[in-house]
Image (cartoon, rainbow, N blue to C red):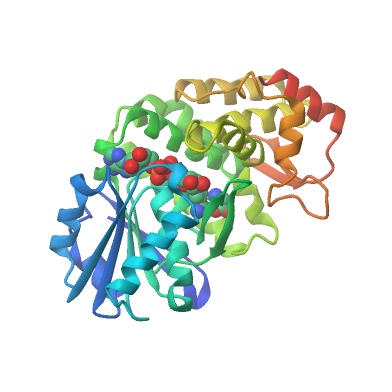
Amino acid sequence: MQTLTVALGERSYPIYIGSNLLSQVGLYTPHIHGKQVCVVTNETIAPIYLEQLKNCLSASQMSCVVLPDGESYKNLSTLNDIFTTLLAEKHNRTTTLIALGGGVVGDMTGFAAACYQRGVNFIQIPTTLLSMVDSSVGGKTGVNHAMGKNMIGAFYQPQAVVADISLLKTLPAREVSAGLAEVIKYGLISDADFFDWLEQNIELLMSGDETALTYAVLRSCQNKADVVAQDEREGGIRAILNLGHTFGHAIETAQGYGNWLHGEAVAAGMVMAADLSMRCGDISEGDLQRIITLLQRAKLPTKAPADMTPEQFVDLMGVDKKVLDGRLRLVLLKSIGHAIVTSDIDTKLLMETFAACR
Ligand code: NAD
Ligand code: GLY
């Protein structure tokens, strides 16, 4: 097992990465401070992993909330179900919430922990590749609103993250690909050597090789932890983690939550960001093609839905959190391995990108 630290002063926490970690009680006990625990998971993951986790936890009162599965349930109504269980089963301020699931469960459990009695502890056990490399690390929690993705939420850090690579064995191939989009993102924004490594190992990762997956999760989390430690609340540099996300969130909102997976939308969005970077003269056509080829090898979409108009993009991107003072801000590439955040966007070039990428 490898341990990384997200260095945030008194809110610092470990990320444990390795195989067969789910039942290792010693990983949880230092981070559970009271006698109550509430595991939040969903109806897909519960039958596979919930008993294994429950059997190893030693809390004197344990509750479980099994949510319906899907991005379309990541909303205030589902969140309320978590609060109802916590209140009905008399959880107090020393309780610990444990998120056992992908980004949907993790984001909702984290937000529930941030709100319940003004804040209780929580632990992330990510079960998808995407949640291991991205959503479980860094403390962004929240739910969707019909008018915008992740628009209701809080920054709230977990006590620990337990990334058990063995759990990926049961993850559907499409979800592995979606996670690889965020892995490739780290290569693009800050780690050119890792991008090269991914070009050499993408098929190994897709075949489920645990050694390769462990390395990719470790390197991705290292990249993310470095950025989060510099800028926890996204006042500056953290925005680079959103490469492709402004375009991607527009795709997710337009298509209806859950139809395009988050990672798929981010993949198409990263191509749009790279295409615009090329039009701005920052990356070459060859680099754009390298990015498209790697995403295609990871079985990810590299174009936006054909029925999305430029007007729809502009409209939906206008409500994105990254819009400041009415000006669109985008993450673009200076090169593979170097991203910048800019509001200096040439509208004509942006329109060309919309036209070229559908
Ligand atoms: P998800 O949570 O919907 O999980 C994907 C699917 O895989 C679900 O059907 C789930 O039940 C199933 N599943 C999960 N683990 C499994 C396993 N081990 N075996 C079999 N099936 C399993 O999707 P996701 O991609 O993990 O997360 C996407 C969400 O994460 C989005 O809501 C996105 O907004 C959010 N996100 C948040 C952050 C952040 O910083 N907080 C970052 C990136 C993404
Ligand atoms: N997924 C973007 C972030 O955590 O900031």
Number of numbered callouts drawn: 0
Residue closer to the observer: 255 or 358: 255
In this rendering, position of residue 267 left or right of residue 210: right
In this rendering, position of residue 42 left or right of residue 280: left
Residue closer to the observer: 74 or 283: 74
- Seen at 54% across and 50% down, the residue is 144
Does residue 316 appear in this view? Answer: yes
Image quadrant in which the N terminus is located: bottom left
Question: Measured from the top left, where is residue 256 in percent x and y?
Answer: 54, 35
- Seen at 68% across and 52% down, the residue is 321
Question: Is 180 rendered above or below residue 35?
Answer: above
Question: Measured from the top left, where is residue 3 in percent x and y?
Answer: 35, 60
In this rendering, position of residue 174 left or right of residue 56: right
Question: Measured from the top left, where is residue 6 in percent x and y?
Answer: 47, 64
Question: Measured from the top left, where is residue 216 in percent x and y?
Answer: 40, 41
Quadrant housing residue 272: top right
Quadrant housing residue 23: bottom left
- Seen at 65% across and 25% down, the residue is 287
Residue closer to the observer: 68 or 266: 68
Does residue 129 appear in this view? Answer: no
Residue closer to the observer: 274 or 37: 37
Question: Is 82 rendered above or below residue 167?
Answer: below
Quadrant housing residue 61: bottom left
- Seen at 22% across and 55% down, the residue is 22
Image quadrant in which the C terminus is located: top right
